Amino acid sequence: MISVEPHRALRRVLLRSTMFRWIPALLVGAGIFSFAFSQPANSYWAYIVCLAGVYLLVVLGFNVLYGMSGQISLGQAGFFGLSAYGYAVLTTAYSWYPWLAVIASVAATTTIAFLIGLVAVRLVHHLLAFLTIGFAETVRILMLNGGPVTGGFTGIGAIPPLTIGSWVFDTYVKLLLLTWFTVGIVALLVRSLRESPWGRSFVAVRDNETAAQAFGVSIRKVRARAFTLSALFAAVGGILFLQLLAYISPDSITVGLSTQFLIMLLIGGVATGWGPLVGTGLIVGLTQLLQPFGAYQGLVLGIVLVATVMLFSNGIVGSLLALWLRIRGGSEERSGRGATLVKSSTVGNSKEGDDNAQ
Amino acid sequence: MPSDVLLVVEGLRKCFGGVTAVAGLNFSVAEGQTFGLIGPNGSGKTTTINIIMGQIAPDRGSVRLAGRNLVGLRPDQVCREGVARTFQNLELFPTLDLFDHALLGAHRHTRSSLAEGLFRMPRLRRDERDSRRRAVEALQRFPERLTPDRWHDKAATLSYANRRRLEIVRAMASEPRLLLLDEPTAGMNPHERLEMIGHLRDLQKEGVSMLIIEHAMEVVRALCSEVVVMDHGEVIGQGEPGEVVERPEIVEAYLGK
C-alpha cells in the first residue's frame, strides 16, 4: 500500500469540504429559480414552495441546536411567533418603517433567546424541552390576551409588505425568491459554522461533554450560542411567514408547529447537511398531495410518517448516508489493517465507567 | 528542588462520603520532568488527575501550575492554562473522525468568535490554519498506526490500542505545558507497550512535562525519574522508581502480606 503523504491528506480534507457539496446546492438553487419564473405572480404552488422555504429556515436553525449541539427544543414556534408578532405590532400599531421593524423584532427575539439560553444551559434533554414548550405557550397566551395591541384571537392582519426601493414584495413569486435567497444565506452560514472551531465544539459537546470540556470547550458558551443561533434563524423565518400570510394569530404559533419542525428534521435526518431540506420538502409536499383524502389526511400522513421512520431510522438522508458508507466500506475491505473493528457504541460516552466515580 | 518547578500539588484532600480518595497529597513536577503516580486500583490516582484538571473540586489543598492557582477553575479554563489529559476510560467523540479529534485537541488555541466562524473572517482562517498544522503534527506522531488514509475514519472504527493513541494525539495537538497521561498503555500487548514507551520517550526528548499514571512497571521504570506511590489515598512512598518498588511496604500494598 502506498502511504499518503500528510500534505496530500491535508489537501484531501480541503477538497472534500469545498467541491463536493456545491453541485447539489447549485442544482437546488437553479431549480427554485426556474420554478419561480415559470409561475404566475400569485400561483398556489409558489405559495407552497415559499412556505416550505420559511419552514426550512427554522429547521436549519433547529438542526444547529438539536443536530449539532444535541439540545432539544419544542419551542421554536415561540421564537418564530414572537418575531412575527413583533413585526406585525410595530408596523401596524406603531407604523414603523418595515425594515426597521424587521431588525428590531429579530434583535429582540434573539436577545430573549439569549437570556433564556443563559438559564437553559443548566437544563438537559427533557427539562429543556419542557422549558421551551413553556416559553412558546407563554408567547401564544400573551398574544391571545394582548388586547387591541395583538388583536386577541383574531390576530393582526393587513401587514405592510417589505420593499427594496420600488420593488415591493407583494406577490408569492417575489416572496418565494426573497425566502429562498435567505435560505441560501442561512445554509451557507450553517455550513461554514460546521467547519469552524465552534461547529466542532458543538458536536464535541453533543458527543462527549467530559472530553470536550477537558479540551477547552466551554459547555455553557456552546449551549447558549447554539440556542441563540437557532432562535435567530427561527425569528427570520417568522418575519417571512408573516410576509407570506400577511396575517398572524395565536393559532399559527401552537406547540403543533414546534412539533412539526421536529418531525421535519427527524424525517430528513438529524445532524445531516441535507436532512432539513429533504424533511421539510417531504412534509410540505405530502400535506399537499394528501389533500384529496380530506378529513382522513392526518391519518394517512401519520401512516406515511410511521412507515418512513421504520424504513429510515436515522431519517432519510441519515439512513441513506449510512447505507452508502456501508457499501463503500464493504467494497474496500478496510485494507485489512484494523482486524478488530469495534462497533461505534463502545467509543466514548462511557458514563457508567466514568473515572470521576473513583 | 529545582527552581523551574511547573506543577505543585500541596495538601490535596478529597473525600467521597465516607471514603477518603486522596488524603493530603504533596508532590511537584519540574519543567521537562516525567513524574509517575502509581499504586493499586482505587488508591486515588485518577481522582488526583481529575482534581488537577478541574473536573473534581478538592476538599482542601492547592494545585499550582507555574505559580498560577488551578483550584476553582473549570476544566476548559485549566485546559487553556496549558494542561491536557488522556482518559483511562477512553473519552472519544463517536461521530468525529481522527482529524477532527486532533483539531479539537488544538481548540484551546482558537480565539475566534461565533460570528467570525459564521462569516469565515480573517481570525477564523488564521485559527483554522494553526489548528490544522497542530493536528497534522500530532497525528504524524503515529505514522505507522494512524496512517493519513485513515484520518477521515470515524473514531468508532479504531482498534482499542489505536483509540489510546488517538487520546494521546488529541492531547498533544493542544501543545500542553503539562501532559497528564492516565494509563497510556492499558490494554496493550507487550509489543504495543514497547512502541508506546518509544513514543513517550520522544515526547520527553522534546521537553514535554508529563504526569503518568501507570500500572505497567516497565513503563514507569523506562520513563519516570520520580514516582509517588499511593494506597487508599495516602502516600506510602516517594522516590526513584527502581528503588521505591523494591521497598517491602510497597510490595505489601500491591501484593498483600
Image (cartoon, helix red, strand yellow):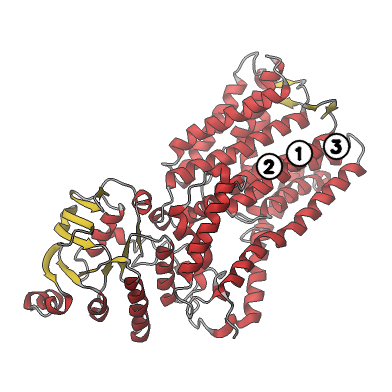
Checking the image for residue A179, the label placed there is 1
Q: What amino acid type should be assigned to the residue bearing mark 3?
A: Val
Dot 3 alpha-carbon crowd within 10 angstroms: few under 14, some 14 to 19, many 20 or more: many
* Mark 3 / mark 1, whichever is N-terminal: 3
Report the quarter where the C terminus of chain A lies: bottom left
> In which quarter of the view is residue A38 placed?
top right
Give the side of residue B14 with respect to residue A185, left or right.
Answer: left
Q: Are marks 1 and 2 on the same chain?
A: yes
- Residue bearing the label numbered 2: A57
Checking the image for residue A173, the label placed there is 3
Whether the residues at callouts 2 and 3 have beta carbons within 8 Å, the answer is no
Q: Secondary structure at mark 2?
A: helix
> In which quarter of the view is residue A175 placed?
top right
Q: Secondary structure at mark 3?
A: helix
Q: What amino acid type should be assigned to the residue bearing mark 2?
A: Leu
Give the side of residue A120 with respect to residue B29, left or right.
Answer: right
Residue closest to the eye, B239 or A29: B239
Whether the residues at callouts 1 and 2 have beta carbons within 8 Å, the answer is yes
**The residue positioned farthest toward the front in the image shown:** B3
- Residue A211 is situated, as x and y percent measured from the top left of the image, at 41, 58
- Residue B207 is situated, as x and y percent measured from the top left of the image, at 32, 68
* Mark 2 / mark 3, whichever is N-terminal: 2
